[in-house]
Amino acid sequence: AQKVTQAQTEISVVEKEDVTLDCVYETRDTTYYLFWYKQPPSGELVFLIRRNSFDEQNEISGRYSWNFQKSTSSFNFTITASQVVDSAVYFCALRSNDYKLSFGAGTTVTVRA
Amino acid sequence: DAGITQSPRYKITETGRQVTLMCHQTWSHSYMFWYRQDLGHGLRLIYYSAAADITDKGEVPDGYVVSRSKTENFPLTLESATRSQTSVYFCASSEGLYRGYTFGSGTRLTVV
């Protein structure tokens, strides 16, 4: 069985602060993929990033960056210099050797002006 | 327009009624999925399909039925709606096992 845990239910920051979202996962598979999705107040689910299990290189894409550590089964996501438009629910998700995407419960991020 | 569309966007139905949520994708993706989203639970998989005429249960299948006679359509039917099925339902498709999902805009279903 696979499981994704997002321990933070809500995070509130002031604009321009950095926000780091924690994600811990469990899987017995050696090959798997990790994702972050964003759900703004409008309700749609927007794909942000994907990382596979055999590539631990951490990257930065614009204001987004992620830290994947297999040793601790963590896949944390950081928004640098947050903006009001970043206010949303963020989901971490795991997909391994089947078709199913398992989601964490989500972290609600509120960015105040 | 290409993409994945769900209909209706909003639906109110009465307890005990049958209701069908529609999902249509234009990419010919093999895999399609139905999730429900409830506060505190994130998204939970109801049913999925690997190809036309191939479907399987997910985490919370009870009370739901799916079919996939054509690759592009994956309707979800609530056979006898209950209040506990009040939720937001998302359909998704995926090109392959190692690809991400693309989600529809969701259907907000209220059972009264």
Image (cartoon, coloured by chain):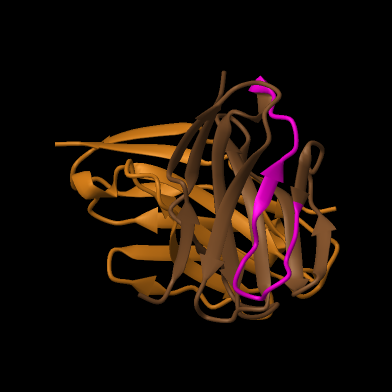
Q: Main secondary structure of the magenta part?
A: loop
Residue A101 on the magenta span: no
Q: On the rendered structure, is B80 left or right of B41? A: right
Q: Residue at x 81, y 63 (%)?
A: B55
Chain A rendering hue:
orange
Is A18 or B88 nearer to us in this picture? Answer: B88
Split into 4 quadrants, where in the image is the C terminus of chain B? top right
| Quadrant, the N terminus of chain B | bottom left
Left of B72 or right of it: where is B62? right
Query: In this view, which residue lies farthest toward the top?
Result: B112
In the rendered view, would you say A19 is above or below B2? above
Residue B76 in magenta? yes
Q: Residue at x 66, y 60 (%)?
A: B33
Q: Which residues are magenta?
A: B66-83
Q: Return the x and y of residue A57 as percentages of the image width and height.
A: 54, 78
- Return the x and y of residue A67 as percentages of the image width and height: 51, 63
**Residue visible at 37% across and 72% down?**
A60
Count of labels shown?
0
What residue is drawn where x is 35% and y is 63%? A64
Q: Colour of chain B?
A: brown
- Where, by quadrant of the figure, is residue A97 drawn? bottom right
For the residue pair A55 and A92, the one nearer the viewer reads as: A92
